Image: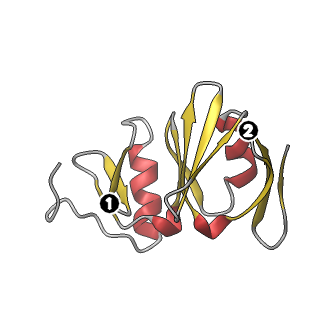
Amino acid sequence: MIILTPDRLLCIKSHEGMQVIDLDKILYIQSEGAYTKICLDEETNIILCSNLCFIEDILGSHDFLRIHRSFLLNIKKVSGFDSRAGCVWINGIILPVSRRKSAKVFQELLKNGIKDGKKHYRL
């Protein structure tokens, strides 16, 4: 069960019971087979028995962007991206951007004021 409240709180049922997560604390969400891992600011993770498509349907219009078949990204947490290398970074973590989604992803990041760091960053 996943519910999004009007004040941007995500209520989820995980293996640890019901939890309430502020959307602004989510860095990214990663698919891991039949499970989904929510990675938070506090370097903690929450594992859900739900697929990424279902969560994307709920969060897609709330500053979250699908960048890869395995990753859903909180745009507000992106610190930069490299369009040549096809990646974004959040809190020192490098996440891949799929070639198929790259044009849309990088355009959306630029629209949100995030600069392309291809001149300052190398993998």
What amino acid is found at the position of numbered circle 2 in the picture?
Answer: Phe
Q: Residue furthest top?
A: 33
- Identify the residue at horizontal 77%, vertical 66% (top origin): 9
Q: Position of residue 106 (x, y in %)?
A: 39, 55
Q: Which residue is mark 1?
A: 92
The image shows residue 106, relative to residue 66, as above or below, that is: below
Q: Residue furthest front?
A: 16
Quadrant of the rendering where the N terminus is positioned: top right
Q: Residues within 10 Å of mark 2 (few under 14, many from 20)?
A: few
Q: Position of residue 19 (x, y in %)?
A: 78, 56
Q: Quadrant of residue 114?
A: bottom left
Q: Which residue is mark 2?
A: 54
- Identify the residue at horizontal 14%, vertical 53% (top origin): 122
- Identify the residue at horizontal 42%, vertical 58% (top origin): 107
Asked whether, in this view, residue 61 is left or right of residue 96, the answer is: right
Relative to the observer, which residue lies in front, 106 or 88?
Answer: 88
Tag 2–tag 1 contact (CB < 8 Å): no
